[in-house]
Amino acid sequence: MQRVAFLLTSAFPVWILLASVLALRVPEWFVWFSGDWITWGLGVIMLGMGLTLTLDDFRAVLHIPRAGVVGVICQFVIMPSLGWAVAHLLELDQLDPALAAGLILVACCPGGTASNVITYLAGANVALSVLMTTASTFAAIALTPLLTKWLAGTLVTVDAGKLCLDTFKVVVLPVLLGVFLNQRLPRLGRRLAPFSPLVSALAIVLIVASIIGQKRELILTAGPRLLAAPALLHLGGFVLGYLAARVLRLVETDCRTVAIEVGMQNSGLGSVLATQHFPGTAAPVPCAISAVYHSLIGSLLAGWWRWRDARRATSLRQVVAQEAQS
């Protein structure tokens, strides 16, 4: 069962793409998952993250290695800057200020839990990925509201205090509950932990598909700018995250991890916060589209890295075999 759960979780990009397409064709299949359901869905995602963590993981954050510090700094420098730049470059604020605000909001969010799966598939540093996701999630309690207020405050009204409180409630409390269950009821935690990534992935799929279904007409009529903006955001995040790590001379596996953590946002959190703070607007739409793009780009990148590693390994074996024969 655990192997099946892992395989289904690894196919997360396929599920999210399929659900997004279906949401555009038959939105009634997904629009029921709205309102409090979306908030509870994010709670399930963060609870699942908590079930994979222990108190030792939190202690490790206090002694986070250089690669992790680089990654978290890049997360909250590169992505918010890109979000603001792309929103203004494509003039999303002229199309709808809420669309620009939504793009900036998701750019200011921490790394997403799906990044841990993509990191594994890419043959990168999974332990570092989990550590960076944890560190950026807790840093987001203050940084996501403050950066959103700073970068999007001229577009729409942003209540940084309330945004900070809501971020704490929908992120920290479920994570701490998961850690508590893992510590106090370790047997239950061990049973649930292998399946929590799959449940989290399903919750993300439902949140994204629901928002796409609800905003179907806007997505179909908004034109290429709305579709191009999240794509540019995440492509830039992956590329600049990797380059920053290379410039700072991190090892290859850590460079990949930083690229994935920077390029993949917690779009579920962005969707929930956008729904709560900009109700009735188009702000959640870039967050939902963001989840589709970063999952697909991350998966393609992971596949390419694994193919390149396999090719290099094959070439190395051939060289060794030739030398042995000679």
Image (cartoon, rainbow, N blue to C red):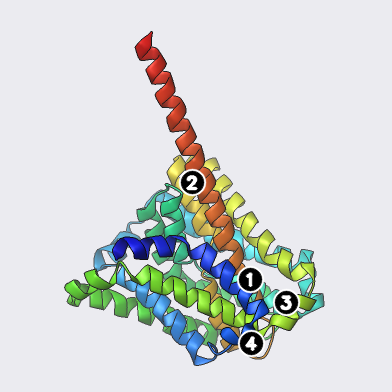
**Residue 278: image tag:** 4
Foreground tag (3 vs 4): 3
In the image, what residue occupies the spot 35% across and 55% down?
127
| Residue 151, above or below 324 | below
Please give left or right for residue 76 compared with residue 102 in the image: left
- Quick one: label 1 or label 4, which is nearer the N terminus? 4
Q: Secondary structure at mark 4?
A: loop
Q: Amino acid at mark 4?
A: Phe
- Quick one: label 2 or label 1, which is nearer the N terminus? 2
Cα–Cα gap, marks 1 and 4: 17 Å
Cα–Cα gap, marks 2 and 1: 26 Å
- Between 326 and 215, the one lying in front of the other is 326
In the image, residue 97 lies at what x, y percent?
75, 80
- Quick one: label 1 or label 3, which is nearer the N terminus? 3
Cα–Cα gap, marks 4 and 2: 36 Å
Cα–Cα gap, marks 3 and 2: 34 Å
Q: Which residue is labeled 3 in the image?
A: 219
Residue 325, picture quadrant: top left
**Residue 289: image tag:** 1
In the image, what residue occupies the spot 49% across and 39% down?
249
In the image, what residue occupies the spot 61% across and 81% down?
211
Q: Are marks 4 and 2 in contact (CB under 8 Å)?
A: no
Q: Are marks 1 and 4 in contact (CB under 8 Å)?
A: no
| Residue 125, above or below 217 | above
- Quick one: label 3 or label 2, which is nearer the N terminus? 3
Q: Are marks 1 and 3 in contact (CB under 8 Å)?
A: yes
- Between 207 and 281, the one lying in front of the other is 207
Q: Secondary structure at mark 1?
A: helix
Q: Amino acid at mark 2?
A: Cys
